[in-house]
């Protein structure tokens, strides 16, 4: 009786798994994936990570790589660095947390051999589980060891589903043939940057005043991966820089424990000899809410320019990278 | 631990395999350890309340058992001790802050100074369920309906049996205690039917309830942004959300117990096919409504009293039922509204029958039945507004504006894509809205069909390969369509 039960249960499990894959494949081939709520894929979707990864595969050595969330891929413009002779590539992606950055760096540091890794540490990313970015990365890259490892380390069933869906999608459309979905206000710029065409925001004072207050509590999980990134860079003798990109002063004011958050990063940085630059917290750098941001926390191109110019000056001042020396380097294949 | 979690997916098969592998004398111990593990996944320290309630009721039961039958007076102090302990726990954790703040409001009204103390307790999960279960045990022992349980371990398992511990069904000792002592061998039919019921429960929970929840929350958390169609839609969706959430839990609980050979009581019987509010309460949360019938309504005199007292009894029972659901005025009004429905329904039964006859509705029974079901559903939905609303003022706003501006919202939905997303899809993707609606219609069809035909029998008579393919496909669809964010069951808060 028990044997019969287990045989039938196993048969149902196998049939169920086959049906699961079959329904997904059918939806992919019929173009009906939007009717499956649990179709966890961001292939060619928001964040333009597909284009970024497609370009990265052709890039060899660079001086600087940037990692982080939208604050990174919308905040560090490689063109600004290039004018100073610094070859840079932006590996930022949607909601990329230190957990995700670690696996991206593990995969690409040996290939791109940067001298400097700049980590943008928007506070929200240290409180998340990294699932959104895991799905984004898996959806827009080839299925590679580091990313399978990332899925396993996420211990989240949705990440596994996303990996399976990606594998099935590749049967229909190989990665090279996936198309990037259009976004009306965003343009992809070589070097991994996403430029917003918006030149200002229309946020009212009332709206900004009504933003929810927040207490930031970085998770041990993300802090642990921050440590792993430090180790990874030390192993390869790469300079690591922590940066918190500017947000509107109104938005920053809503972070009740901002100083404590900044202190956590500053302590980690000091302990490991890492330069920590917080652009929300210095007197010699000011941004204008209306024209430097297109929303409460993302920069317009004017804001990006101001921010990047200051960052390059800081790099020079702290001797992180010498623009002149960098420009005399050899393989800057961008 | 949540039924809809990865932990349960590992926990349950492990417990079942161990249960059927162990000798009978150790089975209760395994289930007891499993039940406490299940509970402590949520919070370890609150298991102490469960232990306290178990010890007190065990002692009270044993002490009452020592008093010979017919000398109930001597049993009374032990019954009181049991009732006061359980009600005391409930009061302290669930109602203290509510009554304290009500006292403060009253003092303010009387121009007196009173600052109410507030205790920041987290409501122990399932407290209303297990305290009611143990109180019924004590009352049954008091009246001599059952013998007190001598085996402390088995009694502790009766209080904490994990399938029904946190959200019922509220079992009676007469049904469950004996089963806990019996030897259960693996039964293929029971295991199959239990898993089938669990799958149906999961479907109701993750595909219907948890998909409807974001749409309902959108409207009920910002009610003043809406009027007309979205308020109606969100309320109807809530009716199905709460039904699928709660009956889904019951199905999983009953199914899980059935896999191990236990028969728990039925808790729902297609409540939205009820033809009157009275009928609704014989189909909705049956284990609670029969509890109130047996331990409150009948002791109050039931309907064997003068008319005004009968109505009073009905009203009190529903008022208490409202309070059982939550320490908030919205729940009390929800209960009072149901009490009013019951009284009005009873008082006007004759007149309503006369009207129906004059309208010749008796000649078209299907139409008459449809009108009765629709009217009952409307009344139930109206009461759900108070149950779901975040505050009394929100509930009043929703009831006042539900039928306002319907033509305007309809016109906006027809002509404007943005309005369609906000007012029809309730800020969800179009596909989610349609899939959820289709799932609700599917549920209605299945429940309607199940009234006349035995769907389970039809299914079990299918050839084995067809059955396997059907179950496999159904499982795949649940995984693809469900919302697996590990949302808690609504009734956990009660």
Image: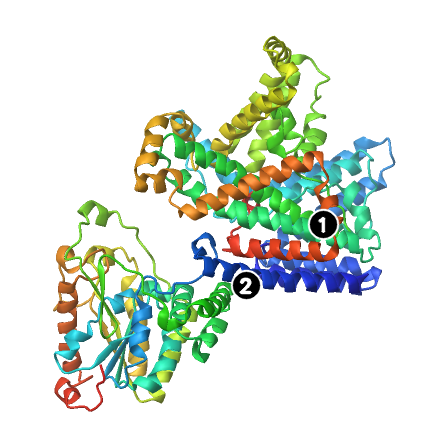
Chain letter of mark 1 equals B
Q: Which residue is mark 1?
A: B55
- The crowd level at tag 1 (other Cα within 10 Å; few <14, some 14-19, many 20+) is some
- Would residue B120 be found to the left or right of residue A126 on screen? right
Q: Nearer the viewer, residue A43 or A253?
A: A43
Q: Nearer the viewer, residue B145 or B481?
A: B481
- Would residue A149 be found to the left or right of residue A271 on screen? right
Instruction: Specify the quadrant of the image occupied by residue A189.
Output: bottom left
Under tag 1, what secondary structure?
helix
* Cβ–Cβ under 8 Å for marks 1 and 2: no
Placement of B473 over or under B14, stated as above or below: above
Tags 1 and 2 on a common chain: no
Q: Which residue is mark 2?
A: A21
User: Which residue is at 49% across, 38% downward?
Assistant: B237
Answer yes or no: is residue B119 visible: no
Residue A18 x, y percent position in the rendering: 59, 64
Residue A228 x, y percent position in the rendering: 40, 79
Under tag 2, what secondary structure?
helix
Chain letter of mark 2 equals A
User: Which residue is at 58% across, 36% downward?
Assistant: B324
Task: Measure the alpha-carbon separation of dots 1 and 2.
Answer: 51 Å
Residue A113 x, y percent position in the rendering: 30, 87
- Would residue A15 be found to the left or right of residue B405 on screen? right
Placement of A85 over or under B224, stated as above or below: below
Residue A161 x, y percent position in the rendering: 50, 65
User: Which residue is at 63% across, 38% downward?
Assistant: B447
Placement of B406 over or under B1, stated as above or below: above
């Amino acid at each position: 009786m028990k044997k019969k039960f287990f045989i039938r249960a196993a048969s149902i499990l196998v049939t169920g798994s086959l049906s699961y894959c079959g329904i997904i494949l059918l939806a992919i081939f019929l173009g009906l994936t939007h009717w499956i709520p649990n179709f966890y894929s961001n292939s060619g979707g928001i964040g333009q990570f597909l284009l970024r990864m497609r370009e990265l595969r052709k890039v060899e050595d660079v001086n600087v790589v940037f990692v982080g969330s939208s604050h990174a891929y919308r905040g560090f413009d490689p063109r600004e660095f290039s004018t100073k002779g610094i070859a840079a590539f932006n590996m930022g992606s949607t909601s990329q947390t230190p957990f995700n950055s670690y696996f991206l760096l593990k995969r690409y540091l040996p290939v791109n051999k940067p001298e400097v890794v700049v980590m943008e540490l928007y506070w929200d990313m240290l409180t998340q589980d990294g699932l959104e970015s895991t799905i984004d990365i898996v959806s827009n890259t080839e299925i590679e060891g580091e990313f399978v490892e990332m899925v396993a380390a996420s211990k989240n069933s949705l990440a596994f589903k996303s990996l399976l869906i990606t594998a099935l999608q590749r049967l229909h459309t190989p990665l090279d043939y996936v198309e990037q979905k259009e976004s009306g206000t965003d343009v992809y710029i070589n070097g991994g940057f996403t430029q917003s065409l918006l030149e200002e925001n229309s946020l009212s004072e009332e709206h900004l005043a009504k933003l929810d207050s927040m207490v930031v509590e970085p998770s041990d999980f993300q802090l642990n991966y921050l440590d792993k990134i430090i180790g990874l860079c030390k192993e390869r003798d790469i300079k690591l820089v922590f940066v918190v990109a500017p947000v509107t002063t109104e938005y920053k004011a809503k972070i009740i424990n901002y100083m404590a958050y900044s202190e956590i990063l500053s302590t980690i940085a000091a302990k490991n000899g890492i330069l920590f630059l917080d652009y929300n917290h210095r007197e010699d750098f000011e941004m204008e809410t209306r024209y430097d941001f297109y929303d409460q926390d993302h920069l317009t191109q004017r804001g990006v320019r101001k921010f990047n110019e200051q960052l390059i000056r800081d790099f020079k001042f702290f001797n992180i990278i010498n623009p002149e020396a960098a420009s005399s380097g050899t393989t800057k294949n961008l | 631990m949540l039924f809809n979690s990865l932990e349960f997916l590992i926990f349950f098969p492990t417990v079942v395999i161990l249960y059927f592998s162990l000798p009978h004398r150790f089975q209760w111990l395994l289930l007891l350890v499993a039940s406490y593990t299940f509970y402590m996944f949520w919070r370890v320290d609150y298991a102490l309340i469960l232990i306290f309630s178990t010890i007190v009721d065990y002692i009270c039961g044993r002490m009452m058992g020592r008093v010979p039958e017919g000398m109930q007076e001597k049993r009374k102090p032990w019954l009181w001790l049991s009732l006061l302990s359980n009600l005391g726990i409930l009061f302290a954790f669930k109602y203290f802050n509510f009554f304290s703040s009500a006292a403060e409001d009253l003092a303010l009204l009387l121009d007196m100074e009173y600052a109410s103390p507030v205790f920041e307790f987290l409501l122990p999960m399932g407290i209303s369920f297990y305290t009611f279960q143990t109180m019924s045990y004590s009352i049954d022992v008091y009246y001599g309906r059952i013998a007190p349980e001598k085996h402390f371990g088995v009694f502790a398992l009766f209080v904490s049996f994990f399938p029904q511990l946190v959200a019922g069904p509220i079992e009676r000792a007469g049904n469950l205690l004996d089963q806990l002592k019996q030897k259960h061998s693996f039964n293929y039919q029971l295991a199959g039917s239990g898993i089938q019921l669990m799958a149906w429960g999961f479907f109701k929970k993750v595909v219907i309830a948890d998909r409807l929840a974001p749409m309902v929350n959108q409207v009920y958390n910002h009610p003043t942004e809406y009027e007309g169609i979205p308020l109606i839609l969100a309320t109807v969706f809530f009716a199905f959300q709460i039904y699928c959430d709660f009956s889904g839990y019951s199905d999983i609980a009953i199914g899980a117990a059935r896999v191990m050979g236990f028969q728990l009581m039925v808790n729902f019987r297609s409540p939205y096919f009820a033809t009157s509010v009275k009928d609704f309460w014989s189909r909705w949360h049956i284990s609670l409504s029969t509890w109130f019938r047996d331990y409150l309504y009948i002791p109050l005199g039931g309907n064997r009293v003068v008319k005004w007292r009968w109505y009073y009894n009905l009203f009190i029972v529903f008022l208490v039922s409202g309070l059982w659901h939550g320490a908030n005025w919205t729940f009390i009004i929800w209960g009072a509204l149901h009490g009013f429905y019951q009284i009005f329904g009873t008082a006007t039964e004759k007149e309503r029958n006369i009207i129906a006859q004059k309208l010749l509705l008796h000649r078209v029974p299907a139409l008459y039945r449809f009108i009765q079901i629709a009217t009952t559903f409307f009344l139930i939905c109206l009461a759900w507004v108070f149950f779901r609303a975040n505050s009394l003022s929100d509930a009043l706003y929703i009831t006042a504006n539900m039928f306002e501006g319907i033509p305007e919202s309809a016109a906006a939905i027809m002509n404007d894509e943005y309005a369609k997303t906000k007012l029809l899809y309730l800020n969800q993707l179009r596909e989610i809205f349609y899939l959820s609606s289709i799932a609700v219609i599917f549920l209605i069809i299945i429940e309607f069909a199940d009234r006349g035909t035995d769907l389970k029998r039809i299914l079990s008579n299918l050839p084995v390969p067809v059955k396997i393919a059907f179950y496999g496909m159904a499982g795949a669809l649940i995984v693809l369509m469900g919302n697996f964010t590990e949302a808690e069951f609504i009734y956990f808060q009660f």
